[in-house]
Amino acid sequence: MDFYEIEEKWNNEWLNAKIFEAEPNDKKPFMIVFAFPYVNSPFHMGHAYTYSIADTVARYKRMQGYNVLFPAGFHATGTPILSFAKRIKAGDKGLIDEFKNIFNIPDEDIKKMIDPLFLANYFIEIDRRAFKDLGFSIDFRREFVSIDQKFSKFVEWQFDKLNEAGLLTKGLHWVGWCPNENNAVSMHDTSGDKEPEIEEITGIKFKVKDRDFSFLCATFRPETLFGVTNLFINKNAKYVICTIENEKVCISEEASKRLSYQFDIRDTQTISNDELLTLKAINPINNSEVPILHASFVDPKNGTGVVMSVPAHAPFDYYALYEENKRYDIKPIKVLEINNYEIPAKKYIEMVDEEDINKKLEIATEKEYKEEAHKGIFSIEPYKGLNESEVREKIKEDLEKSNNAIPIYIIENAPIYCRCGAEVVVKKISDQWFLDYGNQEWKKIAKELLDKMQVLPESARKDLEYTINWLHERAVVRAEGLGTKFPLDNKYIIESLSDSTIYPIFYTFSHLLKDVKPEQLTKSFFDFVILNIGNIDQVSKETGIDYNIIKKSKEEFEYWYKNSYNSSGYDLVYNHLTMYIFNHAIIFKDKREYWPKGIIANGLVLYDGQKMSKSLGNIIPALDIRKKFGADPTRLALIYSSNVDSNPNFELNNLKGIIERLSYIENVIDNIQNYNNTEIKNIDYWLYSKLAKKIKNATNEMEKLLTRDYVLDVLFNTIDELKRYFDRGGSNPLVLNEYISKVLLLMQPIAPHIAEELWHRIGNETFVSLEKWPAIDESMINDKLEKSEEAIDLFIDDVKSIRDMLKRKNREIKKLKIIIASKEKREKVKEYFENRLDDKNIKEAIEKRKDRLDLLRDNDISQDDEIAIFNDAKDYISKKIGVEVYIEREEESKSEKRIRSLPLIPSFELE
RNA sequence: GCAGGGGUGGCGGAGCCUGGUCAAACGCGGCGGACUCAAGAUCCGCUGGCUUAGAGCCUGCGAGAGUUCAAUAUUGAAUAAAUCUCUCCCCCUGCACCA
């Protein structure tokens, strides 16, 4: 089977016939979108999985009689594209190799990618091609990119609405920052792709006795202030005195530079370490005087370069004080009770078996902090008896209130380096804009929306609910990146997830705006089209947009958005999908008929059992697999990898089996004229029965998106059924034709090209893609017949086990005598199941075959029928066992085995 | 730390909600056979172990404990879960301002 040729053929036919170009009509609408791909690389198998599911649903719904809109677009706002272009320009070897080796991009194209727009367009081209090649039933007319100016106008409108609702707020925010390039850094901008994690620590001010400045000590554990015995500086570092927030403090020179991104730091002057070491500091919590000492572990780059020493609870402090400084005159002060240790820090150091002293102290510290946080009990008044975290919060609050402490932000996973080489620092943004997802009213309607919508798998609902609950103010603007300018402050760009929350709306009329200029897309246009505010003549006059375009836009929006779905990867549950819910909820607060109706969240694709990642080099561009194996096998292998509720494992090995099975069906179709039986036999009815059940199962599975089960039923089981059909002598072309036609209909959503091709090969002229979903003919379900077929198989199993045993014993077997249960016994068995008979022999016999209870129960097959059944299967059984077969009635049998016969479980004798 | 999801034969993965019919679907892989000069493809069979005239036993669903329905059984004893409950261990994902 030449998949490539078949796929090219039908992809073109579909495009030429424009069958997926959706227009509103009088059918029920169904709109499904997938989270559009980010175009800094070609999309890979993980994306292909999500898109395949969306297409499968789209194709299924189309068959179900819905008018389906399945659009697609591309996402390009934000920083990654810019940052990739920058990296290419800088000759970043890692990225260039990745592009070369994983995506096979030619050198000359990579060179051009220093232009971010070239880069984006390059991958858009590839992705668009992949959409087509994979046979997605997309209405390509509606495509747009999230950096299109017209789309920007739509985003602006959205933010106007959010602002009107009072949900945009301004405030402080801390970000990772490159002091060299002077902009915010995210994961993509750091070497090693490390996301800077920002953490708040407490800077405590220790006033210096008889001087006009304080030491500023940074600590994670302000509650241990009670246990401070001294301060540490490093005499090999440089220290300065400077003014932070109108107060003079002493910190390391390095810290003063770094903190200048968080605070307004002035009047910096150096101070000698000798002088510092003579000073005395005053502990703000109890006014005790403590000395300043040197400790070599103090890192001037860390925190403020000044450390408060708590020898009882900090291994490093303990070591520095007693081993390094030999200050046995200073006693440790214990503030926490833990395991009744006398001096916890000492104890924890002793517990670690490690040569290297720094490592040893590190391990001890980690262990001590963890255990104390867990079960340490505070032992100093007035907090005695409380656990550590409670005291921490209280003390921190008090100190900050009394101006004895200030919050300082640090990079928790430091050091992180920008790709330019500079170390990333924390910067305070004082006019950051937030979207207030913490707003309770908003949360409430978001939850209402969620309650009304279908979630597949249902288990994702919990996660969505949870995310709605914890989401709070989200920074929505950035200093850098592609995208829409923030309407309230033009120096900012709207952040990339926030500009893509209600974007599916744009698909409903994007194709109508070809001749409209971006500046014509004013607030009144969107207000009218989306929210029905204002009147059309006025909007047309004001914007200069043609009356009919406005009218059509509004019609399309109102038609399609009555029933819209979003299909995404599960990772987007925690951001995009939740924001999708939030934003729709508020924009359509008073027009809830336009709230989205469903979300599909599929799992993370594993590749041969492994996570796909750059470092493993196993990121597979979807087009590669398609080229190698064909689009339909690729799609089948993907959706067969799992049902929607778990993580799919894409295995190349599965492709072989899938391709073979598809070829089998093709083969049957091509040879259908060789069958010429016109009578309808039992096995034909059996096939009909299987078909009816298959349709029933398939429908149910598609509704729940049990794609794995669906492939199993529609493809794998079909092959088994066909094989059995032929094996049992089935050869009626009409029956075969009907069976296969229906199977092709069921295959259409999951293997559209093959289904289309074979559909035509069996003589149809219509597009299978537009056919109706097959009806379930319950009357064809024939359990009795299926049961008797099953009985034959089970019988063969029984015979085989004996035959093999005899073979092992080297006994020769020539014939098989089948002994059908007597009329009398049948009556008895029946009575037994109706509780009318208490016959020990029958009871025992049935008990022995409890593995076949299904066959025996409700069995009203007469002896003559059973003889007919086995007679009909005589050749089949003979073939399977390899001996001649005779059938006789128990009444007439002379075999001693005859008493074992039960209805549908004949006894037998091999001789 | 908090929250969510998991741990099933060589592998992937059903089964668990609604207990028995589960040595556990289906697929992959492996083995054997047919076909072939041969290989591949295809077809048939096997694939936990030991046995065996159609039946039995053992082992078995992360570890441990508990409960109990059907059933067997009986002095209202006892036996009895992949599936129910609890504890423990281990793994994965998320905890944002990033796509």
Image (cartoon, coloured by chain):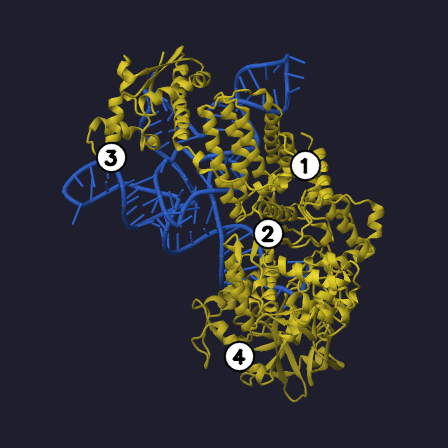
Chain colours: A yellow, B blue
Answer yes or no: is residue A608 visible.
no
A11 relative to A331, above or below = above
Classify mark 3: residues with Cα within 10 Å, few (<14), some (14-19) or many (20+).
few
Structural crowding at the residue carrying mark 2, measured as other residues with C-alpha within 10 Å and reported as few (<14), some (14–19) or many (≥20): few
Q: Share a chain, discs 4 and 2? A: yes
Q: Secondary structure at mark 4?
A: helix
First-in-chain label (1 vs 3): 1
Q: Nearer the viewer, residue A256 or A334?
A: A256
Q: Nearer the viewer, residue A563 or A751?
A: A563
Q: Earlier in the sequence, mark 4 or mark 1?
A: 4
Figure quadrant of the C terminus of chain A: top left
Cα separation, mark 3 vs mark 4, equals: 78 Å
Q: Which mark is residue A27?
A: 2
Question: Is any part of residue A743 visible from this angle?
Answer: yes
Q: Earlier in the sequence, mark 1 or mark 2?
A: 2
- Judging from the image, mark 4 belongs to the subunit labelled A
Residue to which mark 1 is pinned = A630
Q: Do the dots labelled 1 and 2 sit on one chain?
A: yes
**On the image, numbered disc 3 is attached to which residue?**
A834
